């Protein structure tokens, strides 16, 4: 069935998640609307991001603060007012199982679970924060996952049907165009990485720095890196967001793509965002990403710290070759449909299938 066969004019979809337009959930809501779906959003941010840091942590781990109860009331109220055909819940850690059971009593509504994170992530407090989500998993009619390991594991656990929705570039992050030299020096450099700290990530980037290649890093938790290590001058200790994020990507000569080992990822949104912005991508090699981009033509790949250093040196010394690869990567993103609207278009036939089963 093609996406065009979905009865869009009659489809009402309520999507819950963090609706920041620069994040994937906000981009998906915009994509549904672009494709003609009557979509309404319930933003988690007012409930999950209290001003006080200690209250934020208390909310995150106990899931029993007034904000969590207020969120569940808001979800019920919005559901009953909007009367959706599809309730699409993104990483529903704040949703009480009792709320799901109440909403499930509404006749004909189909429930979709979406998550980009690993349900078996290696995090000491993962099970604590995910306890309601894990208890409510069997209440859904469709499971939409970006983690390839989870696709297999959900099927093995009897949680079906499952749809693999790959990560994507967000069109809200626009190509900034030519940047002034001062802006490029402030934000970028020869080699850059944007993403959170993990031990393996630090080890790989440290090898580049030890080789005498300047590395600049943006992202969370980098205070956990070796304080006197080779990356100490490159760690910025603050994130880049929105338009500045796009400018930072375009300010690096080489953007290193390292995926989360804790989350067992093959890709990240940056896997597609970097080439979509016309920037050069040097990504960890794996069986999925090498199918998305042709090696040495549309992106470059590495399989070891030694290969990472070697390819950084090569492409820094060959700017014209780097430019050709970056331009081909951008074309591939457009021609193969690596944007959020393309991923949403692919899932529409699955929504039609579960609606027909009502």
Image (cartoon, rainbow, N blue to C red):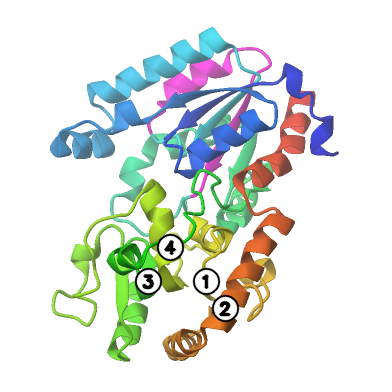
> Label 2 belongs to which residue?
300
Q: CA distance from mark 3 to mark 4?
A: 8 Å
- 117 over 193 or under it: above or below: above
For marks 3 and 4 on the same chain, the one whose residue lies earlier in the sequence:
3
> Label 1 belongs to which residue?
281
For marks 4 and 1 on the same chain, the one whose residue lies earlier in the sequence:
4
Q: Give the magenta-colored segment's residue range.
A: 94-116
Classify mark 4: helix, strand or loop: helix
Where is residue 65 shown, x and y percent of the image? Answer: 23, 26
The reply to whether discs 1 and 2 touch (Cβ–Cβ < 8 Å) is yes
* Residue nearer the viewer, 329 or 68: 329
For marks 1 and 3 on the same chain, the one whose residue lies earlier in the sequence:
3
Dot 1: few (<14), some (14–19), or many (≥20) neighbours within 10 Å? many
Q: Residue at x 28, y 57 (%)?
A: 220
Specify whether 290 is left or right of 305.
right
Classify mark 1: helix, strand or loop: strand
Quadrant housing the C terminus: top right
Camera-side mark, 4 or 1: 4
């Amino acid at each position: 069935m093609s996406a065009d066969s979905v009865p869009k004019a009659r489809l009402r979809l309520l999507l819950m998640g963090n609706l920041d337009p620069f994040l994937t959930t906000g981009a998906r809501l915009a994509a549904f609307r672009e494709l003609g779906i009557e979509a309404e959003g319930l933003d988690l941010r007012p409930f999950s991001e209290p001003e006080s840091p200690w209250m934020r942590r208390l909310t995150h781990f106990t899931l029993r603060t007034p904000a969590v109860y207020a969120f569940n009331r808001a979800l019920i109220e919005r559901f009953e007012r909007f009367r959706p055909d599809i309730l699409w819940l993104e990483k529903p850690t704040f949703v009480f199982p009792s709320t799901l059971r109440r909403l499930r009593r509404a006749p004909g509504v189909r429930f979709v679970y979406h998550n980009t994170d690993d349900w078996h992530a290696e995090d000491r407090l993962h099970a604590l924060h995910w306890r309601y989500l894990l208890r409510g998993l069997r209440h859904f009619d469709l499971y939409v996952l970006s983690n390839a390991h989870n696709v297999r594991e959900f099927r093995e656990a009897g949680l079906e049907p499952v749809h693999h929705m790959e990560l994507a570039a967000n069109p809200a992050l626009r190509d900034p165009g030519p940047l002034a030299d001062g802006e490029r020096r402030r934000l970028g450099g020869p080699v850059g990485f944007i993403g959170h700290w993990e031990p393996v990530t630090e080890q790989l980037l440290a090898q580049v720095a030890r080789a005498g290649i300047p590395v600049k890093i943006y992202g969370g938790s980098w205070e956990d890196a070796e304080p006197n290590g080779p990356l100490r001058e490159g760690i910025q200790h603050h994130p880049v967001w929105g338009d500045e994020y796009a400018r930072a990507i375009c300010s690096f000569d080489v953007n290193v793509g390292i995926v989360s080992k804790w989350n067992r990822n093959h890709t990240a949104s940056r896997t597609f965002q970097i080439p979509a912005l016309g920037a050069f991508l040097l990504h960890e090699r794996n069986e999925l990403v090498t199918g998305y981009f042709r090696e040495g033509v549309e992106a470059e790949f590495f399989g070891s710290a030694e290969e990472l250093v070697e390819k950084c040196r090569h492409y820094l010394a060959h700017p014209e070759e780097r430019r050709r690869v970056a331009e081909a990567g951008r074309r591939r993103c457009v021609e193969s449909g690596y944007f959020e609207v393309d991923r949403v278009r692919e899932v529409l036939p699955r929504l039609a299938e579960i609606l027909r089963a009502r």
